[in-house]
């Protein structure tokens, strides 16, 4: 790290030293004892501009206080049938760790339907996984390895991605904006696997050109299920189930340690932890039903532009498909 970077960290640290309660309390939940690493994340997200990084971090702390994010891990989604429905339609899980000790999160982009609950339940679930990662998994990994581990790896499964993905773009943009503004630079690398033609076309023509260079460098589109490439950085036991063999098919139905399943150890530990925290926080109160509402942010300009361009491209693709099918159905005089 260069002299300029060190100076920026010290300058931002001095600004954060003046932060008062209740912002200071929630800041402790954010940095988990790794203050310098947290400051670096926000500085990277604002291209090492100290003033912008300071504003971003303070805005994040205000968002946390206003939406009581510190209590998010004590707010279970109930009844359990509803939580199961959320898990079945928002496919995400943790399959293990890389050889460097980074948690490996698997996301079923193509097969997530987001159609079994309201937007607020999906946002609540997403934030809970973020908070559990940052306040439980990463501190535990850091302790185990004797060094700060503050980021994760994400493997995105595009199996089953269809034109109907258009209906998910708004929700995915909201979730992406929440992450960009409040959990910046938490992902070391994004690996995209099982990508169908429609993704490849949209990625090259629409998404990639609109991304910042810093973000583009983090994304790797792997051939097929990505097994061979991913085994270079993790053991097979940590490989997401949809990466275990070529032509692995539906990531929802794999019998091999499906990390999206509610029965997977990660989800069992997560849900039990949240239930236990709720009993500690409100021991005499029955667990309330209803989603935990969080202020939904206005999407950043970059996300909005990508969403609009992606929507336009998918519509063009759909029209092209319909035209192709209608042309195929017309018989010529020579037939």
Image (tube, helix red, strand yellow):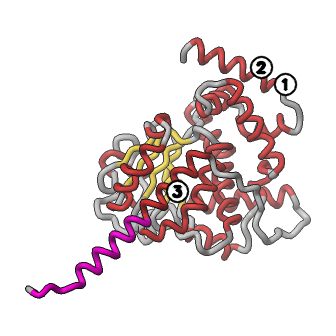
Q: Main secondary structure of the magenta part?
A: helix
Element type at marker 1? loop
Q: Going by the image, does 63 lie left or right of 195?
A: right
- Residue on which the image places disc 3: 308
Nearer-N-terminus badge (1/3): 1
Name the image quarter holding the N terminus: top right
Q: Quadrant of residue 6?
A: top right
Above or below, 153 relative to 120: above
Q: Residue at x 68, y 49 (%)?
A: 131
Residue toward you, 109 or 148: 109
Residue toward you, 293 or 311: 311
Is residue 316 covered in magenta? yes
Q: CA distance from mark 1 to mark 3?
A: 40 Å
Q: Residue at x 78, y 40 (%)?
A: 61
Q: Of tags 1 and 3, which is closer to the observer?
A: 3
Residue toward you, 298 or 142: 298
- Residue on which the image places disc 2: 14
In the image, residue 55 lies at what x, y percent? 74, 33
In the image, residue 23 lies at what x, y percent? 83, 37
Q: CA distance from mark 3 to mark 2?
A: 40 Å
Element type at marker 3? helix
Q: Going by the image, does 61 lie left or right of 240?
A: right
- Residue on which the image places disc 1: 18
Q: Of tags 3 and 2, which is closer to the observer?
A: 3
Q: Going by the image, does 317 lie left or right of 331?
A: right
What range of the chain is rendered magenta? 315-333
Q: CA distance from mark 1 to mark 2?
A: 7 Å
């Amino acid at each position: 790290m260069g002299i300029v970077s060190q100076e920026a960290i010290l300058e931002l640290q001095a600004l954060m030293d003046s932060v008062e309660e209740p912002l200071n309390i929630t800041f402790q939940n954010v940095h988990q004892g790794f203050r310098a690493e947290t400051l670096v994340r926000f500085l990277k997200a604002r291209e090492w501009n100290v003033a912008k990084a300071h504003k971003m971090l303070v805005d994040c702390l205000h968002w946390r206080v206003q939406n009581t994010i510190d209590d998010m891990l004590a707010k279970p989604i109930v009844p359990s049938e509803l939580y199961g429905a959320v898990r079945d339609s928002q496919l995400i899980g943790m399959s293990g760790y890389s050889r460097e000790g980074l948690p490996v999160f698997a996301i079923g982009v193509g097969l997530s339907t987001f159609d079994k609950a309201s937007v607020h339940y999906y946002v609540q679930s997403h934030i809970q996984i973020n908070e559990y990662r940052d306040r439980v998994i990463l501190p535990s990994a850091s302790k185990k390895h004797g060094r700060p581990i503050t980021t994760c790896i994400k493997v995105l499964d595009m199996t089953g991605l269809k034109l109907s993905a258009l209906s998910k773009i708004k929700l995915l943009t909201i979730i992406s904006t929440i992450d960009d503004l409040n959990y910046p630079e938490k992902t070391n690398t994004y690996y995209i696997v099982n990508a169908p033609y429609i993704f490849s076309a949209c990625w090259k023509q629409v998404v990639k050109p609109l991304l910042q260079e810093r973000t583009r460098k983090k994304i790797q589109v792997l051939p097929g299920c990505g097994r061979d490439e991913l085994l270079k950085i993790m053991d097979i036991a940590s490989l997401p189930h949809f990466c275990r063999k070529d032509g692995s098919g539906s990531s929802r139905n794999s019998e091999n340690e499906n990390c999206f399943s509610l029965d997977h150890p990660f989800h069992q530990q997560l849900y039990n932890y949240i239930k236990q925290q709720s009993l500690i926080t409100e021991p005499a109160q029955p667990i309330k039903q209803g989603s935990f509402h969080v202020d939904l942010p206005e999407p950043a300009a970059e996300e909005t532009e990508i969403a609009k361009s992606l929507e336009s491209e998918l519509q063009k693709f759909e029209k092209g498909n319909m035209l192709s099918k209608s042309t195929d159905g017309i018989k010529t005089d020579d037939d």
